[in-house]
Image (cartoon, helix red, strand yellow):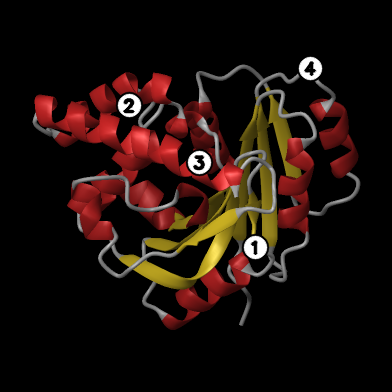
Amino acid sequence: MQKELFSIITVCSNPGESIIKTVDSVRNQTYGNIEYIVIDNESSDGTIEYLNKLKHQMSRFCYYSEPDDGIYDAINKGISLSTGTIIGIIHAGDEYMLDACQKVSSIYKNSSCPDVVYGGLRLVFNASDHYIDLYVNINMPSELKTRMSLYHPSIFIHKIAYNKYGAYNNLYSLCADYELLLRYYDNHASFVKSNSILSIMEYGGVSTQLKNAPRMVNEIISFNGFDESKSKLYYKAVFIAKMFLYKIKVMI
């Protein structure tokens, strides 16, 4: 039986050398049927030259460098260009565990074609040896009603689900991943858990920056219908807790 084709998408804008470890984590996957699509926002830091070299080093690799309207617009471009049946999104600077696609493939092989497969995340602090492994429990999808309970780099979505439930909503520049997963859950998409850590992400992205908290809260309220006053207090507390956790880890 032919293996399912995975489409892995990376979006970037002047990522510098951080994209190298991302690419390496894709090209070194133990699973052997992957197409890799990079959507670049006209980088001027040597990324284009690096991607040009990859065209001669990787099969089923392509990249596009053109202006976009943000991260999720770029992701949607990648999805529209993909020809695989299972789609993973890994941003420049993040990495897949080397057997991530193999483990996800096994779930699809042994399950009745779930819409979403989700797994754990290794969160690395301050480009150091300090990290924590964040596992997920069986109730994580239902917790989407109150928070972003899944880890986006460790999520794989079937192409049929994108066609059925839609892609990312560009109205939400920071929380479109949360809105998409909540929309899928509300429309009874099927979620299946992997018991494994599937990806590695370095702490410090836009979702962990306190300055972005008000905008993120406003986006979440707009699509989730939370009580505004309670939500602002809740999410402010979450951001402060994240910052506190970070400070503890970098001091270890």
* Distance from the alpha carbon under mark 3 to that under mark 4: 31 Å
* Front-most of residues 12 and 197: 197
Secondary element under disc 4, as helix, strand or loop, is loop
Tell which tag, 1 or 4, sits nearer the viewer. 1
Image position, residue 89 (x, y; %):
55, 47
* Distance from the alpha carbon under mark 1 to that under mark 2: 29 Å
Q: Is residue 60 left or right of residue 151?
A: right
The answer to which image quadrant residue 244 occupies is top left
Tell which tag, 2 or 4, sits nearer the viewer. 2
Tag 2: amino acid: Met
Q: Which residue is mark 4?
A: 44
Image position, residue 94 (x, y; %):
63, 45
Q: Are marks 2 and 3 in contact (CB under 8 Å)?
A: no
Secondary element under disc 2, as helix, strand or loop, is helix
Q: Are marks 3 and 4 in contact (CB under 8 Å)?
A: no
Tell which tag, 3 or 4, sits nearer the viewer. 3
Image position, residue 208 (x, y; %):
45, 33
Q: Which residue is mark 2?
A: 216
The quarter of the picture where the N terminus appears is: bottom right
Say whether disc 1 or disc 2 marks the residue closer to the N-terminus.
1
Secondary element under disc 1, as helix, strand or loop, is loop
